Amino acid sequence: MYKPLAHGGVELDDQPNEFNCPVCQAGKDHFHLFVPPTDDVTAPENSEEEDAIDPTGPRLLYTKFGSPDVTSLKRQYERSKLNPQPFFQRYEVWTTQKNSKLIESILLDLPIPQIYLAQQENENVDVIDGQQRLMAIFKYLRGDYRLKGVSKHLEGKAFSELPDSLQDRIESYELHTVTILKESDAEVKFMLFQRLNEGSTSLNDQELRNSVHRGTYNEFLKRLAGEPEWRKILNLKGAKPHPRMVDVELVLRFMAFRDQKYLNHPDKKTSKFLDKQMMIGATLDEKERLKAQVDFRQAIELSRLIFGAQASRRFMAGSDDNPQGKWDTRINRALMDVQLQGFLRHPKGQYVANADAIREGAIDLMASPEFTDLITHTISEAKRIERRFDLWKDFIDRTLADSGQGGRLFSRQVKEELWSEGQECVICRQKIRDIDDAHVDHIVPYSNGGKTDKDNAALTHRFCNLSKGRRSAGTP
């Protein structure tokens, strides 16, 4: 892997032809320059999914083999009938020298690996595998670069400077293609795209869905991913979408749990769950999509209103060694699922009226050992999905329910008043560094009739309060 910064900022193309790798002594033509995939919006997911397709089922793949010459492919490209760089193809970047080697191979009449195409509903085709080869050819024909690192009689030549015989040889060169026809089974197409892209820069599942499931619903998801409040939750700057479509996939997750419900999530098969949602979404009419949009907007607006910059981030409680808790800076997918779906259970006004209580209760739940485990380990296991949704749903319903004794959780105002009077934990006697890590505890227990007011309130670390609860229950 060539990294310019490791070589004084000099690009690989600008190194002399005799340059060799300082580690293995490989020549320049053995380097492959690429941008590694990134999923920096979300925390790493402990995934244990086992995706497989039943080969005995009625799953059909319709293909068409061809040998078009360069001229005909270029004509399709210029008429926008052939798209060598669809949205999901944009990460690998060939150097001028590598492009030149391909042109030289064509002039030597050497074989080039076949190119895979996917036919769309409008009969146009996208390049699934081979986009770098095609773009190297098309760019050379239109004069974007001169040959570099090739034989002496070709070195430095633009296409227009080649003899007519060599120009003809390039334009008449036949490329072997396999076109996956639009009638093919979507799931098999998805698997094929995965297999074709198991190289250095593999496409992720959402990028593959973007190629397989074209149409209104796919564009609908991408439009929702551009919602300002959503971009704030994901901490995406500017107008550009996430380069690996993570923003769109998270919208799809919201829609999948909204439409299919968490009890129908297959065990350890989140990818299948999302694939099915793409097919469900394709059947929705405009009215149904509009309702889904309203629900999505309500969920993300309430999430931002109540949790602010910590929306869909988990609160991490302290430990015996250090009672200080803190917020994770990354999105937690499992938490996002339950948090956003939880805002669809009641009228919007009830959440707004109880915003402080919801925030405090949510932090308490996130700090509990059981819920922490449910959102950080084996998060696609069906029984664990059901348990974390049930815990969050019950917490929301309890918080919004009326009680003659008054709410169990203290208001934010009471917490801020106690905080201003001193930040010492009444249990461990250490300073509490973050107000969100402060838990307001009942001096006289709530279960014994203690009131939820300032006169019956004391500040503790959340971890210390949880530890007190475990001790009182007889847990070591």
Image (cartoon, grey):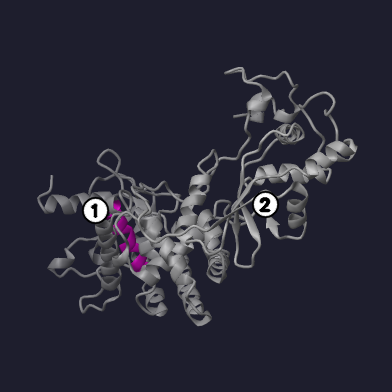
Report if residue 458 is visible in the image. no
Q: Is residue 369 magenta?
A: yes
Tag 1's secondary structure? helix
Who is closer to the viewer here, 182 or 268? 182
Q: Which residue of the protein is positioned furthest toward the left in this rendering? A: 474
Residue found at x 89% / y 35%: 163
Q: Residue drawn at (56%, 63%), measured in percent from left and top?
A: 182
- Residue 73, given in percent of the width and then of the height, sits at 73, 52
- Res 416 label: none
Q: Which residue is mark 1?
A: 370
Q: Quarter-wise, where is residue 113 in the image? A: top right
Q: Is residue 360 magenta?
A: yes
In the rendered view, does 25 fall on the left or right side of 333? right
Residue 284: image location, x then y, percent: 48, 76
Q: Amino acid at mark 2?
A: Pro
Side of 297 relative to 358 (left or right): right
- Which residue is denoted by mark 2 in the rendering? 84
Residue toward you, 99 or 124: 124
| Residue 181 falls in image quadrant | bottom right
Bounds of the magenta segment: 356-372
User: Residue sitting at 36 percent across and 59 percent down?
Assistant: 57
Q: Quadrant of the N terminus?
A: top right
